[in-house]
Image: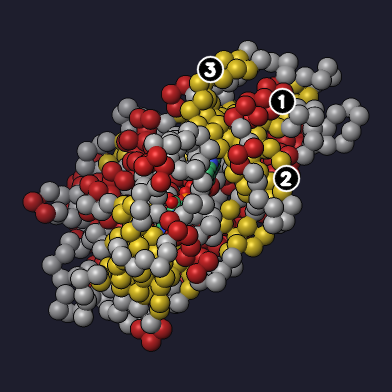
């Protein structure tokens, strides 16, 4: 029985930074019972992370929050690399494109973490009236280990504490600059540290899953007895956002400036005409903490001016500045208690800001986790799929740490000059070239596990199982609109079976599609088997078909195709016509050449199974309907006849 100070919730998220807000937004869109708490009185107001990578943009589109982002972001097209010249100054040594053309249809852009957080906060409120409970922090938790296998149980009990508003508010002593918000004097002034013996304002929350998205000094991680492991040699960085006045001709590009002796500066143009400047300020011995108060904005500006010499740079307006420590560290495990307590984002990995990964990788952690939690909580999938979160994201974190270690060494190493060995312009340029796919987020590939299965590379030469499903433009069969195929794969919790039957004017291709459709639509086919009674047949697994046949022909052939492939009638009688698409030139937007792009032979065709997070689970032959069903049978749960 639950008393007044007790409550129940399916998912309790601790921490409303990018990782926590991505999870909360996804779960609220999937209508999962969720709460999200944060010890801070308000979200980030300025600064912090600012790069949004290509894959992040694709995910925002899948979550349908991209319009707000598109309107505000700043795109950076080129990276200029500067090195020391003969006269003790600097000169441009090379230029590389920031987003390699064709890598993604979404480009790398910059937008402050404050805006990213604000847009999520808005989206989750709209989706399910979910709001961040601020000035709230956990003080303890217990686990009922006998209930971990019971899907109906709430095995985690968390005590939440309401915190007093920060003292600065009362004093009117509002600081600007250094810290997480402009209102707190110290990032580590956590209310949970300040929780005394006073038990007023406490609440006991029983939850099924507890997710720690509470940053690099994660309370959840520490209370699980876990720690971040890795380099003890930390460095500390200064970062600031400013309007610049300079005779450097490339301030609206990304600049990597390697001086002879003054160090390295990274400058990234961003929204509202501002520039983000990063500069490494020093190294720390093991156990040493940086004296943040000693790292003033004057020192950051001076360092930047020294690196840029002989160019002049002044900063007429400073919007935000910070100093923060970083080590390349990762946690041994991302989940405990049979995946009932999980950690994500900076709570399980930290690295330098140079490749603009912090916010992106953290959000991608919880994008990976959200749909899995929803599938388990809805009773659609076995609990075992939750373990793939740790398998998939821990490997990605290790890759990131490894990459960051190499990249940082180049970045902070002294520039090569006539008198000394060091990092040459060629090495720097190669590092940027090599890193671009990985840092864009599109290079992440999950290894085989229970939901990353069959690879038949000869059927789709350019589709990598475990990787995200790349985009090619197609044409809607019923409306002749140019459509982005990846854009059809919304992050709405549904799986997709994407069929490439080739040209159905060829009777063998038509027969193969019909046989496949009949099998997928039969009682033992995945969609009929796993869709709860009374719901649309595409509500759990949606079938999409991409023909190598002109749309006019598809329109006439459509009624002769099995009903599982047909446009599904939605509530109010509206049909989802875009489930039939054609690989052909569009009237106004060119040609996507999807079959060629995916490396699929139109004479043979194939079937691609795509997860709700757009990662490819498997590529199957047109006559492998049984294998497709077996794949879903390995982790899905059929609804009970009553539901
Ligand atoms: P965070 O963004 O750290 O979010 C964690 C959240 O958990 C916070 O809202 C925090 O208040 C909350 N929380 C923590 N403990 C508790 C608790 N006990 N109870 C309740 N809530 C709790 N990256 C860059 O790329 N460039 C930068 O210039 C840059 N500057 C930074 C400056 C600072 C001061 C900090 C702290 C980070 C900076 N980063 C920067 C890193 C970047 O912000 C993170 O990589 C990214 O935000 C990670 O997202 P996250 O959600 O995992 O963690």
Q: Residues within 10 Å of mark 2 (few under 14, many from 20)?
A: some
* Label pair 1/3, CB-CB below 8 angstroms: no
Query: Taking 246 as reference, is 76 above or below it?
Result: below
Identify the residue at image location x=63%, y=30%: 300
Which residue does the numbered mark 1 point to in the structure image?
A: 307
Q: Which element is circle 1 on? A: helix
| Of callouts 1 and 3, the N-terminal one | 1
Q: Which element is circle 2 on? A: strand
Distance in Å between CA atoms under marks 3 and 2 = 29 Å
* Label pair 2/1, CB-CB below 8 angstroms: no
> Which quadrant of the view contains residue 589?
top left
Rendering coords of residue 429 (x, y %): 70, 34
Q: Which element is circle 3 on? A: strand
Which residue does the numbered mark 3 point to in the structure image?
A: 316
Discs 1/3, front: 3
Which residue does the numbered mark 2 point to in the structure image?
A: 283
Task: Report whether 421 appears left or right of 537.
Answer: right
Front-most of 473 and 211? 211
As drawn, which residue projects farthest toward the left?
572
| Of callouts 3 and 2, the N-terminal one | 2
| Of callouts 2 and 1, the N-terminal one | 2
* Label pair 3/2, CB-CB below 8 angstroms: no
Rendering coords of residue 51 (x, y %): 50, 38
Q: Residues within 10 Å of mark 3 (few under 14, many from 20)?
A: few
């Amino acid at each position: 029985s639950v008393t007044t100070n007790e409550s129940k919730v399916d998912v309790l998220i601790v921490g409303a930074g990018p990782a926590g807000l991505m999870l909360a937004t996804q779960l609220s869109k999937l209508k999962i019972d969720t709460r999200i708490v944060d010890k801070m009185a308000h979200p980030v107001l300025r600064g912090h992370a600012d790069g949004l990578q290509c894959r992040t943009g694709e995910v925002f589109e899948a979550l349908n929050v991209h319009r707000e982002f598109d309107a505000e972001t700043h795109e950076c097209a080129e990276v200029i690399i500067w090195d020391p010249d003969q006269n003790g100054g600097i000169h441009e040594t090379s230029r590389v494109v920031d987003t390699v053309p064709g890598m993604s249809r979404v480009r790398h852009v910059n937008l402050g973490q404050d805006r990213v957080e604000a847009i999520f906060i808005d989206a989750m409120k709209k989706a399910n009236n979910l709001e961040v409970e601020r000035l709230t922090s956990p003080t303890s938790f217990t686990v009922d280990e006998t209930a971990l296998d019971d899907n109906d149980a709430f095995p985690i009990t968390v005590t939440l504490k309401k915190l007093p508003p920060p003292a600065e508010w009362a004093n009117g002593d509002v600081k600007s600059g250094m810290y997480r918000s402009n209102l707190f004097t110290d990032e580590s002034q956590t209310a949970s540290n300040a929780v005394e013996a006073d038990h007023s304002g406490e609440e006991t929350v029983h939850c099924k899953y507890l997710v720690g998205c509470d940053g690099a000094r994660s309370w959840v991680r520490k209370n699980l007895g876990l720690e971040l492991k890795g380099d003890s040699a930390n460095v500390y960085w200064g970062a600031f956002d400013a309007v610049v006045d300079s005779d450097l001709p490339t301030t609206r590009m990304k600049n990597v400036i390697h001086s002879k002796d003054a160090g390295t500066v990274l400058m990234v143009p961003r929204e509202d005409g501002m520039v983000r400047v990063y500069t490494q300020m020093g190294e720390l011995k093991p156990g040493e903490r940086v004296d943040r108060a000693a790292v003033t904005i004057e020192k950051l500006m001076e360092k930047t001016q020294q690196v840029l010499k002989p160019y002049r740079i002044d900063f007429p307006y400073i919007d935000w500045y910070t100093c923060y420590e970083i080590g390349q560290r990762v946690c041994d495990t991302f989940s405990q208690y049979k995946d009932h307590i999980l950690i994500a984002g900076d709570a399980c990995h930290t690295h330098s800001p140079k490749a603009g990964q912090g916010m992106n990788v953290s959000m991608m952690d919880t994008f990976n986790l959200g749909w899995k939690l929803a599938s388990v909580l809805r009773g659609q999938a076995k609990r075992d799929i939750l373990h793939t979160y740790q398998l998939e994201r821990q490997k990605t974190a290790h890759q990131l740490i490894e990459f960051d270690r190499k990249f940082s060494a180049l970045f902070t190493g002294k520039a090569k000059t006539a008198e000394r060995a060091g990092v040459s312009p060629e090495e720097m340029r190669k590092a940027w070239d090599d890193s671009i796919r990985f840092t864009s987020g599109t290079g992440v590939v999950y290894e085989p596990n229970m939901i990353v299965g069959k690879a038949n590379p000869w059927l789709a030469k350019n589709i990598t199982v475990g990787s995200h499903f790349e985009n090619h433009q197609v044409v809607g069969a019923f409306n002749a609109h140019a459509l982005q195929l990846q854009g059809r794969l919304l992050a709405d919790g549904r799986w997709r079976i994407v069929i490439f039957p080739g040209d159905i004017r060829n009777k063998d291709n038509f027969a193969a599609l019909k046989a496949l459709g009949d099998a997928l639509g039969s009682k033992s086919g995945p969609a009929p088997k796993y869709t709860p009674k009374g719901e649309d047949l595409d509500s759990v697994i949606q079938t999409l078909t991409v023909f190598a046949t002109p749309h006019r022909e598809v329109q006439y052939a459509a009624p002769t195709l099995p009903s599982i492939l047909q446009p599904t009638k939605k509530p109010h009688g509206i049909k989802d016509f875009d489930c039939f698409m054609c690989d052909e030139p569009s009237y106004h937007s060119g040609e996507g050449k999807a079959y060629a792009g995916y490396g699929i032979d139109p004479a043979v065709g194939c079937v691609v199974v795509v997860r709700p997070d757009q990662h490819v689970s498997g590529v199957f032959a047109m006559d492998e309907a049984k294998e497709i069903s077996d794949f879903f049978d390995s982790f899905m749960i059929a609804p009970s006849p009553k539901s």
